Image (tube, rainbow, N blue to C red):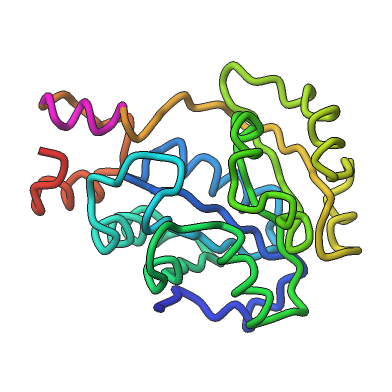
Amino acid sequence: MEDKANIEDLKTKIELIFGGSFDPVHQGHLNVINSLRKHFPDWSIRLLPCSVPALKEPTSASFKQRVAMLELATKAIKGIVIDQRENDRFGKSYTLDSLKSLAKENPNVKRALVVGADTLKSMHKWFHWQEVREYCHLIFVNRPGYDINDLAKEMKLLGFVLVKNKHELESSQGSKYYCLIIEEKDISSSEVRSHLLNNLSVDRFIPNNVNEYIVKNKIYQ
């Protein structure tokens, strides 16, 4: 597993974990990452590429290719770790397994899993979702078509408590959630792949260096 930074050197109060297939990484992902860096300048960001999606179709690009694109897209952003542990496990990639692994490696670090507001509709399908709150907090970012203020009832049922001040996440290891309002960018990886397959412009969707990598390696053709 190769990290872009040593997490222990960052002396972070909270480690933000942002996972996804990143197939490919696009401006919507980067908008979230840059917003996290802006709003939580003293906290580290661990990107967790999924190896074998549990709730989605298999990825089009290989894990190695998706990591390479992620590295290209985030190389100018400070305090980023790209964690490849999910490729070291056999079978489907479960967030809970990664959270447990991270907790075992460094039990003193508090963590917050960053998810879109639309994730709420599928959280009950997560592998042993009831255990997630034992290992991390949640940070919800708004998504087009989803009102982030409508989370309260559902999150209470899932056992998470709303906090209005981000520093309240520092007081425990998990079971709290925080809402972060960011600029919305309605972009999906499937839309990017469709454009690439049909030889349409992707200039507004992905960074130039990522597009160059895709073309060079003939991905999504």
Q: Is residue 198 above or below residue 217?
A: above
Residue visible at 45% across and 71% down?
85
Residue visible at 74% across and 51% down?
130
Q: Quadrant of the N terminus?
A: bottom left
x then y, percent, for residue 51: 37, 59
The residue closer to the viewer here, 98 or 209, is 98
x then y, percent, for residue 24: 31, 44
Tally of marks: 0
x then y, percent, for residue 121: 62, 29
Residue 197 forms part of the magenta stretch: yes
Q: Residue furthest top?
A: 145
Q: Is residue 61 above or below residue 162?
A: below
The quadrant holding residue 98 is bottom right
Q: Quadrant of the C terminus?
A: top left
Residue visible at 19% across and 26% down?
201
In the picture, measured across the screen, residue 70 lies left or right of residue 81, that is left
What secondary structure prevails in the magenta region?
A: helix
| Range drawn in magenta | 191-198
Residue visible at 70% across and 32% down?
181
Residue 87 forms part of the magenta stretch: no
The residue closer to the viewer here, 163 or 56, is 56
The residue closer to the viewer here, 38 or 55, is 55
The quadrant holding residue 52 is bottom left
In the picture, measured across the screen, residue 210 lies left or right of residue 74, that is left
The residue closer to the viewer here, 77 or 52, is 52
x then y, percent, for residue 29: 46, 42
The quadrant holding residue 86 is bottom left
